[in-house]
Amino acid sequence: MGEKESKKWVLMATARSPTNIAVIKYWGKRDETLILPVNDSISVTLDPSHLSATTTVAVSPSFDRDRMWLNGKEILLSGGRYQSCLREIRRRAEDVKDEERGICIKREDWEGLHVHIASFNNFPTAAGLASSAAGFACLVFALAKLMNVKEETTELSSVARQGSGSACRSLYGGFVKWAMGNKEDGSDSIAVQLANETHWEDLVILIAVVSSRQKETSSTTGMRESVETSSLLQYRSQVVVPRRLIQMEEAIKKRDFPSFAKLTCADSNQFHAVCLDTSPPIFYMNDTSHRHVQLCFLVHRTSYTYDAGPNAVLIAPNRKVAHLLLQRMLFYFPPPSEKELDSYVLGDTSILQEAG
Ligand code: ADP
Ligand code: DP6
Ligand code: CO
């Protein structure tokens, strides 16, 4: 192939990853660069057909630098996290051959090749529904596919962790534990699957989007401030979570919904209490979130959890209870009328943002 010809090819790979919602929250790092947490956490990975990130990565000799578009807008890749993921995947890249198109990339060539990345989330970004988890898991998975990385899921999960802590749990389905580990190099800070997606099939998770606006305090900034100023966080990570984790693992194993629900709500409440105990305090939940919590207590056998945002994740033990909960939700938080929707389309955004 001549120089001009050889610059024409583009090789692509696409992946889709689900988000995950923590039932025992990760909040606080002991190492900001490697992203090592101050406590273990447990999450449930959602079905990828609902909340997910879809990422396409492309490589071509005609690209002169790495670039990324998130939801259609170009973002800077200068942040350390994207660089860590790119570096770690490039380091593990293998030879790639496409005989039909006469393309051959040697493992040592990857260092000199640039990538373009385009990612879309089918749910609100940076609004407390763990877009960073789906996003970085997906980015790492797509890059690994493109570069023919042969590592096990554990290894990819550790790379995703260096993009966003919660992302290490999205490489697995079902219930996942992220063990904090205690080694300085982070080699034992890994995610493990506790039970696969078929283990507790009756469980229903409802997401109530209260606001799709980007939160004012990102999770990264929020947890840094909590580590610096909250004494409740120290108590939580050293005393409460270790105990709660054992109970949660047991509840999941036995599919014991009452215990699971009690622990999930308690952990969400404590995480938000830590946010209030931070200086200056962080308010992720809003009045609508508080009303959802009250409603949840009115419907017997339901549970809730809130990540770093106002959007509710409601959990029911089965479809029957989920229907009941949904009915109540729609009664207390009816969808906007056509007139309200019209004024929304015409630019009055206050209605939907205020609506629960
Ligand atoms: P969330 O609660 O949604 O996880 P965070 O504050 O933790 O919010 O993270 C939001 C950040 O995650 C975004 O600003 C962006 O940097 C990153 N992110 C979100 N979605 C993606 C994606 N699909 N691909 C890569 N990075 C993403
Ligand atoms: C409240 O993983 O988004 O969702 O590691 O700084 O990217 P970084 O933070 P992130 O924090 C998630 C916090 C949480 C709880 C959880 O997912 O465990
Ligand atoms: Co996040």
Image (cartoon, helix red, strand yellow):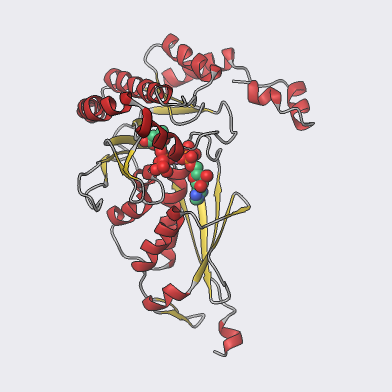
Image check: 98 left or right of 274?
Answer: right
In the picture, residue 176 is in which quadrant?
top left
Q: Image height check: is 115 above or below 257? A: below
Judging depth in this view, the residue of 331 and 264 nearest the camera is 264
The residue most toward the right is 346
Q: Quadrant of residue 147?
A: bottom left
Residue nearest the observer in this picture, 328 or 34: 34
The quarter of the rendered structure image containing the C terminus is: top right
Q: In which quarter of the image is the N terminus?
A: bottom right
x and y percentages locating residue 163 in the rendered image: 41, 51
Name the residue at 56% across, 26% down.
Answer: 210
Residue in the picture at 28% in, 28% down: 234
Instruction: Compare residues 195 and 343 and report the one nearer the observer.
Output: 343
Q: What is the residue that sits farthest to the top in this orientation?
A: 298
Residue 219 appears in view: yes
Whole-percent x, y for residue 80 in the image: 44, 55
Which residue is drawn at the image coordinates 25% and 41% (left, top)? 180
Q: Residue furthest bottom?
A: 2
> Quick check: 69 above or below 178?
below
Report whether residue 53 is seen.
Answer: no
Q: Splitting the image into 4 quarters, where does residue 18 fall?
A: top left
Residue at image coords 30%, 35%: 41
Q: Is residue 193 above or below residue 54?
A: above
Question: Could you tell me residue 282's position as x and y percent?
Answer: 47, 26
Instruction: Locate residue 252, reporting x and y percent.
Output: 26, 29
Q: Compare residues 17 and 81 and report the one nearer the observer.
A: 81
Numbered label tally: 0
Say left or right for 215 vs 349: left
